[in-house]
Amino acid sequence: MDVYLEGGAHLRRPMRNFLRRAVGSSHISIDVVACRSRERAVARFARASPSDSLLLVDSEGDDLNGLRQSVASRVGLPGTLDRTFFMVQLMEAWFLADRAVLAAYYGSRFNARSLPGNRQSEQIPKQEVEQGLRNATRGTAKGAYDKTDHTPDLLNTLNPTTVYNACPHFKLLVDHLRIINP
């Protein structure tokens, strides 16, 4: 299964391992194709083999049904709607779902009170997620949250069960992977 991901190459291995842990099997065949932007991910997904690939992009707060329809019309292949998944509103929402990992990773100076109060992390607007992470981590030894430097480590330690239980769109992705890779 090829996962066309909005994100940089530094996310390939950590995302693959996180998805494998979420599915519950290190033997599942997942290859993450890091495409940087949403547009590149959609374009590469459109050229991929439809039966063994899926798209995983940030929703950025956009209307999911409209975004899914837009991807389907661009790709123009049957089954595209069923193979399009979103990190709502962005991947960092997964980190907010597992605040214990954030606290452990950033250490004693991590300020959890600076994170958005809403525990349904997929409903938190992108700007609030990003600002909350920056504010909560600013005084830590690792410094303010940095997407490039910190995300791979966080994905490697994130508890997939916690994210699965807290994030309905992540649950849809994992359930799909479990069905196609029994």
Image (tube, grey):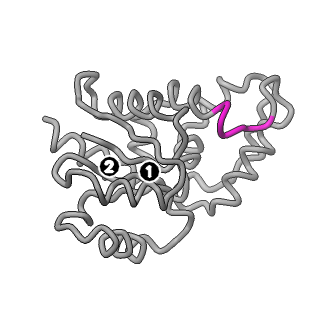
Query: Mark 1 against mark 2, which lies toward the viewer?
Result: 2
Q: How crowded is mark 2: few (under 14 residues within 10 Å), some or many (20 or more)?
A: many
Q: What stretch is highlighted in magenta?
A: 144-150
Name the disc covering residue 154, or none.
none
Residue toward you, 70 or 61: 70
Disc 1 marks a residue whose amino acid type is Cys
Q: Residue furthest front?
A: 47
**Which quadrant of the figure contains the C terminus?**
top left
Q: Name the residue under label 1.
A: 167
* Residue at 35%, 28% in the rendered image: 21
What is the CA distance from the residue labelled 1 to the residue labelled 2? Answer: 10 Å
SS state under label 2: helix
x and y percentages locating residue 176 in the rendered image: 23, 48
Compare marks 1 and 2 and give the one earlier in the sequence.
Answer: 1
x and y percentages locating residue 120 in the rendered image: 53, 55
Can residue 71 be seen here? The reply is: yes
Q: How crowded is mark 1: few (under 14 residues within 10 Å), some or many (20 or more)?
A: many
Residue toward you, 5 or 102: 5
Tell me: residue 137, above or below residue 85: above
SS state under label 1: loop
Q: In this view, does 172 lie to the left or right of 135?
A: left
**Which quadrant of the figure contains the N terminus?**
top left
Q: Mark 2 points at which residue?
A: 173
The answer to if 147 sits in the magenta stretch is: yes
